[in-house]
Amino acid sequence: MSEGAKAKAAGSVLGRVPKSTFRAHIAEGLRAAILNGDIEPGAQLVETALADQFGVSRGPLREAMRQLIDEGLLVAVPYTGTHVVGLSVDDVREIYSMRVTLEIFAFEQIWARRDQSFRQGLVARRDALTACIDAEDDAASIVAELQLHGFVYEATGHKLLLRTWDSIRGRLQLYWAAHHRAHGIRGPRRDGHDRYVEMALSDDFDALKSEITDHMARGGRQTEDFLRGREARAVQGL
Amino acid sequence: MSEGAKAKAAGSVLGRVPKSTFRAHIAEGLRAAILNGDIEPGAQLVETALADQFGVSRGPLREAMRQLIDEGLLVAVPYTGTHVVGLSVDDVREIYSMRVTLEIFAFEQIWARRDQSFRQGLVARRDALTACIDAEDDAASIVAELQLHGFVYEATGHKLLLRTWDSIRGRLQLYWAAHHRAHGIRGPRRDGHDRYVEMALSDDFDALKSEITDHMARGGRQTEDFLRGREARAVQGL
DNA sequence: GCGGCTCACATTGTTAACAATCGACTGTCT
DNA sequence: AGACAGTCGATTGTTAACAATGTGAGCCGC
């Protein structure tokens, strides 16, 4: 994904050279498969089978898996196996509490530098998100919401902050995708983001801070409830 | 390092099984070599040479290098080479601004749960740090200071936060180690940390917040000054 | 003398075979 | 019947050879 961003920044007009390196393709494909739910949380990944499936050798595949491990989507224990990370309520709490802190920090960084292009970019992504919500396209709205929030992190120009957001985004998407697959409907509805963007463009930083806190509290509660229901159903199923 | 912590948690009395997996050893060795300055910032790392030096094949070595890349200590461009990350004042600013936010967040998380063991652990690490400073052992004091701050992150029990701290710690240590090698003396002297710990154990959260902000501002300024001097000297050297 | 081209070298990317380790099954002994 | 040791299969860790790519030197034509 950072490749795409780089290409766009450099001028996307000339059609993006393949740039080789299987590792990147495999990582992308695997990540998509996990977030799509083609591979369930907790499932084991066997290197030989995956290498066969992707049509490559185990070397590049292992490196791609290492990358997903660092992204927090996989967990590996030496000589025994690697699994897709499981879903837990604690993780959701950690993710959302972290998001509150990081996103307020992001706005602190950019607050005085919010220029026209920032406002336009934010509004454009808000509109894209509401369009997806109105079209009832859950998968697209997940991506759109991540891009809306991600835009703030990018706009700060804070590379370390953006890196940290990237390390969280994957797991957040994992939970949202699982929620979407289970219930079909998901996430705060459109007016929630309308208010968020409104505050982000206002001159009242404290109001934005409490809006972010509320926004995350709503999202976190929703995801936690989904998870608890899932756990209850799993116990019933046994 | 997480291995050591795990071994300690499991009971370090029985002398630590090698636990196999070259990858971890190599990563540890390489990281130490970089932080020691045996490999200078900006230097290129050649896989074959390193593999030869470590006495292993390129496979495990590549995976170890991938890990260091994810830690932000190396940068790689496909088919051309991988280098130790260079030192830049922007990075220092980012690291220290991030530290302010993360460390305040950490104390928010643990503030109401500061029990006896937390206080004792904090004081113990403060004492260890002052001992290293009094002994004028710079290398040890760098580690001690990282452990003092790291203890706060660990105490929160916030896995995602700890993970984020881990991703920053390496680069922070890189800058401190470079500073140490250049000047021989480094870091805020002991009373700075005395005050920090005092505030951390007090009941005035706002006072702690401003102490953290000041603490980081001092450290950041010091590191930035060192870097600017280094750059100036490099230009002069050309 | 200078710009572009070719070619060889250095380095990384990839592959397939081999070795080490873990988990479960089975058979035996008490 | 229960517990324990040995063994087998599955999976990951490791290795060395092979292929693809980028870089720079040297050469040629102008």
Image (tube, coloured by chain):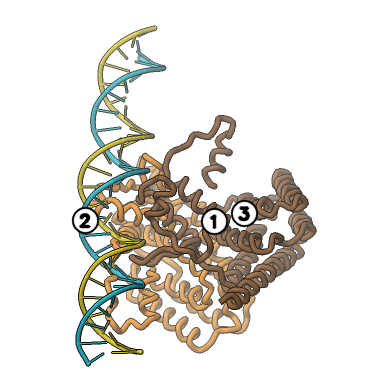
Chain colours: A orange, B brown, C yellow, D cyan
Q: Are marks 2 and 1 in contact (CB under 8 Å)?
A: no
Q: Is residue B229 left or right of residue A58?
A: right
Q: What residue do we see at 43% from left, 70% from top?
A: A146
- How much space separates mark 2 and mark 3, taking CA atoms? 42 Å
Closer to the N terminus: mark 3 or mark 1? Answer: 1
Q: Position of residue A125 (x, y in %)?
A: 42, 79
Q: Which amino acid is tagged 1? A: Asp
**Disc number lying in front (2 or 3):** 2
Question: What is the chain letter for disc 1?
Answer: B
Q: Which amino acid is tagged 2? A: Gly
Q: Secondary structure at mark 3?
A: helix
Say if residue B99 shows up in the picture. Answer: yes
The circle on residue A55 is: 2
- How much space separates mark 3 and mark 1, taking CA atoms? 29 Å
Q: Secondary structure at mark 2?
A: loop
**Disc number lying in front (3 or 1):** 1
Q: Residues within 10 Å of mark 1 (few under 14, many from 20)?
A: few
Q: Are marks 3 and 1 on the same chain?
A: yes
Q: Which amino acid is tagged 3? A: Tyr
Q: Is residue A36 left or right of residue B160?
A: left
Question: What is the chain letter for disc 2?
Answer: A
Which residue is tagged 3? Answer: B153
Q: Position of residue B188 (x, y in %)?
A: 73, 62
Q: Residues within 10 Å of mark 3 (few under 14, many from 20)?
A: many
**Disc number lying in front (2 or 1):** 1
Q: Residues within 10 Å of mark 2 (few under 14, many from 20)?
A: few
Q: Position of residue A210 (x, y in %)?
A: 60, 71
Q: Position of residue A137 (x, y in %)?
A: 32, 71
- How much space separates mark 2 and mark 1, taking CA atoms? 40 Å
Q: Secondary structure at mark 1?
A: loop
Which residue is tagged 1? Answer: B38
